Amino acid sequence: MTGRTFTYLILLLSLNAAAEPFTPADNDIIATARATNTAQLNQDELMALLKQSQQVGKTELRQGLLKNQLQQRYAQSATPQLGYMYARVLQREHQFSEAMAI
């Protein structure tokens, strides 16, 4: 393969490899987390887990568990402390209107 042919081939491939950037809207959820833990945590354990999840690299690990636990508990008994924790979890997912409704 000559140098000129190789250059044309590389140029052709690079032009086809371009992609347009995607910018999600403020309320778009771009990734979901699933938790498979079925343990029922008390309010103190949920608050401790919420505080731990604020550390770098820990949010994704605990977000699904927190959201599922708090959603179920808040539906059963809507206490101010549960509402506060649930709203904070929703805010992390940029679900601001849902968090304000709580």
Image (spheres, rainbow, N blue to C red):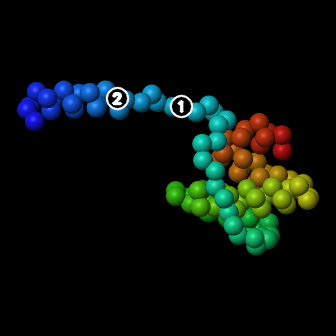
58 up-or-down from 32: above or below = below
Q: How many marks?
A: 2
Q: Quadrant of the C terminus?
A: top right
Task: Name the amino acid, label 1.
Answer: Thr
Q: Which residue corresponds to the image point at 82% horizontal and 52% vertical from the top-left?
A: 83
Q: Which residue corresponds to the image point at 86% horizontal and 56% vertical from the top-left?
A: 74
Mark 1 residue element:
loop
Could you say which quadrant of the image residue 7 lies in? top left
Q: Which residue is at the front of the view, 36 or 54?
A: 36
Mark 2 residue element:
helix
**To which residue does mark 2 refer?**
16
1 up-or-down from 45: above or below = above
Q: Is residue 45 left or right of residue 8?
A: right
Task: Name the amino acid, label 2.
Answer: Asn
**To which residue does mark 1 refer?**
23
Q: Which residue corresponds to the image point at 76% horizontal and 48% vertical from the top-left?
A: 87
Residue 58 can be seen, yes or no: yes
Query: x%, y% of residue 53?
Result: 61, 59
Q: CA distance from mark 2 to mark 1?
A: 21 Å
Q: Is residue 29 left or right of residue 43?
A: left
Query: x%, y% of residue 45?
Result: 73, 69
Q: Residue lying furthest right in this view? A: 77
Looking at the rendered image, the disc whose residue lies closer to the viewer, 2 or 1, is 2
